[in-house]
Amino acid sequence: MASNLNQHHHHHHHPRINGQISPPPCPHLADFLSRNGSKPFLALQDCLRSKPPGGRAAIRRDPSEVPRCVSCGDSSRPRLYACVACAAVSCHAAPSPSSSHAAAHAASYPGHEIAVDVDRAELFCCACRDQVYDRDFDAAVVLFLSTSSTTSSSSLVPASKPENLRKRRRVDYCPWSPDIQERILVGNGSSRLDCESDQKPWGLRGLNNLGNTCFMSSVLQALLHTPPLRNYFLSDRHNRYYCQQKNAKNDNNNARLCLACDMDAMFSAVFSVGHAPYSPAKFLYSWWQYSANWASYDQQDAHEFFISMLDGIHEKVAEKDRCKSHSQGHGDCCIAHRVFSGILRSDVMCMACGFTSTTYDPCVDISLDLEPHQGVSGKAGPAKNHHSCNGNTDSKSSSESCGISSLIGCLDRFTRPERLGADQKFFCQQCQVRQESLKQMSIRKLPLVSCFHIKRFEHSPIRKMSRKVDRYLQFPFSLDMTPYLSSSILRGRFGNRIFPFDGDDADGSNEMSSEFELFAVVTHTGKLDCGHYVTYLRLSNQWYKCDDSWITQVNENTVRAAQGYMMFYVQKMLYYKVSEKQVS
Amino acid sequence: MRNSVNRPPTPDAVEHQEKEPTLQEIINIKLIESGEKERLMELLRERLVECGWKDDMKALCRAFVKKKGRSNVTVDDLVHVITPKGRASIPDSVKAELLQRIRAFLVQAAI
Ligand SMILES: [Zn+2]
Ligand SMILES: [Zn+2]
Ligand SMILES: [Zn+2]
Ligand SMILES: [Zn+2]
Ligand SMILES: [Zn+2]
Ligand SMILES: [Zn+2]
């Protein structure tokens, strides 16, 4: 950290804020730095406080100081600034210069323009009346807030970060761009879309029910139209003939079983001419063989099938490609994980001292609890329900009166800090005893395709009983995942700082890739045991209902009204590429 | 900060501090000293996020920055433009809850 604090040259390198290039420092800050360096900012380190532990950063000379304006004596003004040059605290208000003692202070004492907000620990130029940034100062604040001990995993460069994650960063997803030969192939392939006489999109066909197999068909329909997965198989990246030939050489009994090969066969068949329903019998057989030795699997559950299928593809492909590790954390191990694998971050903070322990876990989907029943008490009410209520934020109980659960609400709850009860105390490395803690989840890395699984089936292993929760859940067609990213969550905790937070990409591409479009919804209707799965697919912005072998065009309101069980969202960039019809 | 140079002459206005503090001042200081102010702020932040107020303000800010151009807007411009709208759109339920909490604090602190 010490070396970091001395990198003064950074000030002139147009650093980035929230992934965007920040403007050069204002003349007052530039002048201040050239005369004093960052020393005055570093001196502020001693005045950093957070109350309660883990709370926001504030500036106080001693912990119990009540800051007040030296000019008017007021301590209740919302904005109080401490001059960085002389420590005088002044009040500030936006509109007129006369109402700001901070601006008056800056005007009367040249060189006293830069001040620090005592309640936010953020720098401000009282002459420009704008926030300014200093890398060293921000580094000191983040370091202070991360933990008071240097041995812990800092939130910026987590010490606990597994080796594979570090590797992962260097080999981030790089989109495949076709060479000339492939481009011709692609061109030939896409011309098919244009010469379709009926308006049915390419590859849209029913899947025959082979006896209670709708749980499988519903997921296969979503996978067949998952843009990056479809592109992978249709561009022959896993050739079944080649794969089987290769396997025959290593005379391994199990080697012939390859779910990716079966996917390849299915993609070829489904994306060939015609619209007759397809029977995924071969696939079912292979998958059944694969999962036969998988004890805890629930035959009828689409989500369980989805998970086991990705596992199956991973196991076979990663094994064949002699991937050193079987762990999916890489994301590059196999096509299943390259498409679906994201990374979750979990912070557990000690409520006594603020020490935070951070862990990262790969995930192929996010399972969300349906929000608890609402409308009884506003206190337990979910967040942002006004999304569903035409934005009448003024009315007292807009969120209570409409009481509709939403995917957004579920995600808000998923990433909200959660106080772990006295029965789940965690061992704090700093206090060296078990303490009450605050846990917060966030998304470190978004996958190309985000699958959200709504926990509609409640299993109680003790009572050997399961039940289904039939409750409507609203889901958006376009979803911005920015608020749930680790970088956003950390920014909320640390304030506006100059350098990237966990997961902020240096090139600012984050903002683009956090926008998602819905392309498939797997729904479940009926009772737990005798229910039926149906998938809605969005192709070229038109919705289709895939009910076993039956495909029908449906209105988007039908989809909105459906009881979603699994929602598949793809990064917007990838979605528009598929939906645009080729213009030749 | 403590060992800073160039401390300007103490402003004459410091005398203000010696005058009898108002009731509002006393309450404010009690709130700060007890840590209750920080808790209230946290509660308020949470409520304003829940009711969508924060998103609305964010949208207003974005719109304003877009209109003015990214490099022509200062924090003070934003505060000046957004504050009246922000104050006006805080749900009554949130105000009521906060008032309730402050009252409870005053009773308990026996002011
Ligand atoms: Zn003042
Ligand atoms: Zn000063
Ligand atoms: Zn300035
Ligand atoms: Zn294969
Ligand atoms: Zn894998
Ligand atoms: Zn601790």
Image (tube, coloured by chain):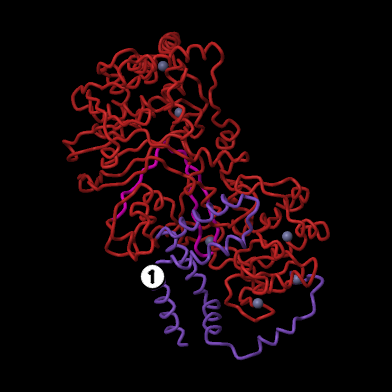
> Which amino acid is tagged 1?
Asp
Asked if B34 appears above or below B66 in the picture, the reply is below
Magenta stretch: includes residue B104: no
Q: Position of residue B90 (x, y in %)?
A: 43, 66
Left or right: A87 as drawn, with respect to A172 = right
Q: Position of residue A191 (x, y in %)?
A: 42, 14
Say which quarter of the image contains residue A46. Answer: bottom right
- The chain carrying label 1 is B
**Residue identifier under label 1:** B92
Mark 1 residue element = helix
Asked if A26 appears above or below A480 in the picture, the reply is below
Q: Residue furthest front?
A: B67
The quarter of the picture showing ligand 5: top left
The residue closer to the viewer here, A424 or A228, is: A228
Q: Position of residue A527 (x, y in %)?
A: 17, 40
Q: Which residues are magenta?
A: A344-372
The residue closer to the viewer here, A442 or A166, is: A442
Asked if B19 appears above or below A135 in the picture, the reply is below
Q: The chain coloured red carries which letter?
A: A
Magenta stretch: includes residue A367: yes
For chain B, the rendered hue is purple
Q: What is the quadrant of the N terminus of chain B in the image?
A: bottom right
Helix, strand or loop: magenta stretch: strand
Q: Position of residue A418 (x, y in %)?
A: 42, 57
